[in-house]
Amino acid sequence: MAVFTMPSLGADMEAGTLTEWMIKPGDTVTRGDVVAVVETQKGAIEIECFQDGTVETLDADIGETLPVGAPMATIRAPGDNAPAPAEAAAPPKTPHAPKPPAPPPAMPDTDETPPASPAARALAAERGVDLAALSGTGPGGAIVMADVEAAAAPTRKPQAEPGAGLDMAAMRTAIANAMARSKREIPHYYLSQTIDLQTASDWLTETNATRAPGARLLMSALLVKATARAAAKTAQMNGHYDADGFHPASAVHVGAAIALRGGGLVAPALHDAQDLPLDTLMARMRDLVTRARGGRLRASEMTDGTITVSAMGDTGADAMAAVIYPPQVAIVGFGAPVSRPWVAGDTVCPRMTVTATLSADHRVSDGRLGARFLAAIDAGLQAPAAL
């Protein structure tokens, strides 16, 4: 038997509230299946299963707030025998009957509104779905997110409402706690390099000239890809540091920092970013932004990041020294691209440039290695067609 526990979804998480079960006793699950939805300071996170097997019991109630590591379910591995009748009769570990979730104070249940999970309510508000018109398929007839998804499919809004489903004050507190821990425990060092972006900018203009707006590439995709390629060649920038020391990662999962409407920040991972074609990478970045701002991310996206990229976009400060997100060991901050006088050969001419600032963990790397890493990013951006 394996115990499925409340996962840690980042350095800033201590507990989560179970808002929806996607499984029931007797269901067969495989690694990667979404089995539950947990509400955290960063919204509703879809929790994935990390083993194959059969659901034996559900050991947590809907609406229950559980600390990281608390048991949530028991899963019987393939080949394990089910409990014998005598065992099942003795102090059984029966599944809890899910309790109807308590609705948020601002959206109380009425005679016209059926019970719904908090996550379903947030999704309904985001998609403009009238809960009173739905029939729930959850426990006791409660409306769950699958019901809202089905109702919203034909008329989905193109964008989430600002801050939908998110407690911005709680998120800001969580971010502050994580960053305070990072600055307290990680010996940061910082290196900055100004990179000539003119070649990359010209290539983007030419590439996008015949594309529809939704298919165009953004400079951010090139920055992420160049960083991922450089990290794949520099093991000391890509991995996690814990009580046992540094563990280099075998793939580059770039955490893409996303600013949320109304405030707050998340950095979900773009898996295997070093190998993704630019068009695929751009599509995944757009998808992450949409789901992050709607408060709908997956657990693996919140925990798998091995290095983070934070970019100011087209407007903002010229440079940014970011704080490392533990347990990672590096983050690259890109300022806003700006036209500057640039020496090219024997002439001075205007060129589009960007300042890249590396914040790295001195327990794992040093300035010389960090400088080579920034140089590798620069080299990648000088050959955008090869990214």
Image (cartoon, rainbow, N blue to C red):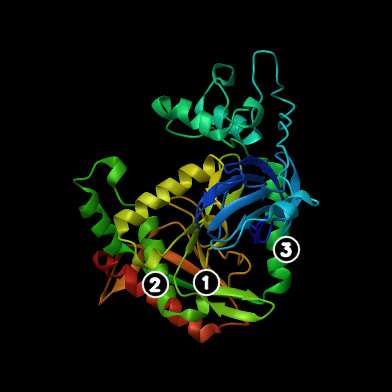
The residue at which mark 1 appears reads as 358
Q: Which mark is residue 14?
A: none
Q: Is residue 45 visible?
A: no
Q: Earlier in the sequence, mark 2 or mark 1?
A: 1
Asked if marks 2 and 3 touch (Cβ < 8 Å), the reply is no
User: Where is residue 323, by image quadrant?
Assistant: bottom right
Q: First in sequence: mark 1 or mark 3? A: 3
Give the labeled residue for mark 3: 180
Could you tell me if the residues under marks 2 and 1 are in contact, i.e. CB atoms within 8 Å? Answer: no
Q: CA distance from mark 2 to mark 3?
A: 28 Å
- Return the residue at label 2: 377
Quadrant occupied by the C terminus: bottom left
Q: Residue at x 25, y 68 (%)?
A: 386
Rate crowding at label 1 as few (under 14), some (14 to 19) or many (20 or more) other CA atoms within 10 Å. Answer: many
Q: Of discs 1 and 3, which sits in the foreground?
A: 3
Look at the image and tell me in which quarter the N terminus lies: bottom right
Q: Looking at the image, which is closer to me, 266 or 371?
A: 266
Q: Is residue 332 left or right of residue 10?
A: left
The amino acid pointed to by label 2 is: Ile
The CA span between labels 1 and 3 is 19 Å
How packed mark 3 is, by other alpha carbons closer than 10 Å (few <14, some 14-19, many 20 or more), is few
Kind of element beneath mark 3: helix
Residue type highlighted by circle 1: Leu
Q: In the displayed orientation, state which residue is furthest to the right.
A: 91
75 and 18: which one is in front? 75
Label 1: element kind? strand
Q: Position of residue 334 (x, y in %)?
A: 47, 62
Q: Nearer the viewer, residue 332 or 140?
A: 140
